[in-house]
Amino acid sequence: MKKIVGLILLAVFVNFSVKAQEDSYRAGEWFKFRIHYGWFNASYATLEVKEETYDQKEVFHVVGKGKSTGLLDMFFEVDDNYETYIDKTNNLPVKFVRDINEGGHTKNRIIYFDQSANQAKLKDLKHNKEETFQTKANVQDMLSVFYFLRNKIDHENLKKGDEIYVDLFFDDENYKFKTVFLGREVLKTKFGKIRALKFRPYVQADRIFKEEESLTFWVSDDKNKIPLKIKADLAVGSLDADLEAFKGLKNSFQVIVD
């Protein structure tokens, strides 16, 4: 059950076509997700966008939090905090925070990005260590990629089978993250039926995931591109995350009326 919030925050948006930037979010946007394992609620996760000044730059400060609930909290406590500071001028991260406790497994790390030098300085606060790594140009962290690519998705012209590779830096490694567009669906949600885009990110099979194609996610087929549902097939059972509540959307949000 580790990396629950990581699944939510990483399995998000991809860019399939070149298009002028389109504002898909703003300060004040807030999402809440209910994460469940079978019939049992496992945890809740939230994402919130704020406006701040960081290092003399106007930035979006995004905070992602995850907290276990119910029986899971008694046997496997999850208390995760992820933050990213995104430069408004280019939608690139300048700082990333990961402070987590997942069943006693803890990490407390800060990454400072120097996008002009293609470098990331990692400060491990738990072990009092610091190291600098080379990164790819215009690299994203696991949270900023959500917002960076939301602005780029041309939801009107996506074609089934379209795919993209995104450069990410996470912990102390560079990753190439591939996602494929599977098509359009009408998704039943607690808010009603919503037109959705369906994607499949490809992840390396290990002891957590059953296979490369174990993750699927759906986002709204509109200018917001908000995450509606994520499904992860695990080695034992499956884990689902559903949008539970939202506010502060930049653009209108429509529900299909029968």
Image: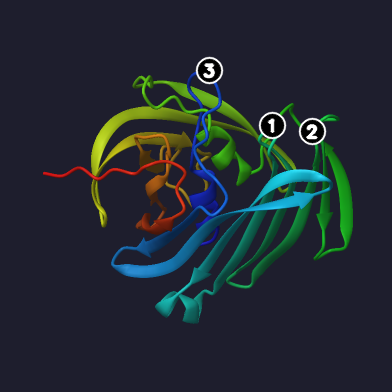
Residue 75, given in percent of the width and then of the height, sits at 49, 79
* The quadrant where residue 197 appears: top left
> Which residue does the numbered mark 2 point to in the structure image?
115
Vertical arrangement, residue 36 with respect to residue 133, above or below: below
> Where is the C terminus found, in terms of image quarters?
top left
Assess disc 1: are there few (<14), some (14-19) or many (≥20) residues with their C-alpha within 10 Å of its C-alpha: few
Relative placement, left or right, of 223 versus 255 is right
Residue 249 picture location, percent across and down? 45, 48
73 relative to 253, above or below: below
Mark 3–mark 1 distance (CA, rounded to whole Å): 15 Å
Q: Which residue is tagged 3?
A: 18
Q: Secondary structure at mark 3?
A: loop
Residue at 51%, 52% in the rendered image: 29
- The amino acid type, in three-letter code, at marker 3 is Val
Label located before the other in sequence (2 or 3): 3
Tags 2 and 1 touching, CB below 8 Å: yes
Residue 79: mark: none
- Helix, strand or loop under label 2: loop
User: Depth check: 250 or 238 in front?
Assistant: 250
Q: Whole-Å distance between the Cαs marked 2 and 3? A: 21 Å
Where residue 87 sits: x, y (%)?
A: 71, 40
Task: Read off the residue under disc 1.
Answer: 90
Estimate how packed mark 3 is, as few (under 14), some (14 to 19) or many (20 or more) residues with alpha carbons within 10 Å. few
Which numbered disc, 2 or 1, marks the residue that appears first in the sequence? 1
**Mark 1 residue element:** loop
Q: Position of residue 90 (x, y in %)?
A: 69, 31
Q: Nearer the viewer, residue 207 or 51?
A: 51
User: Which residue is rendered at x = 51% and y = 74% of the image?
Assistant: 76
Q: Residue furthest left?
A: 258
Foreground mark, 3 or 1, reads 1
- Nearest the camera: 200 or 144? 144
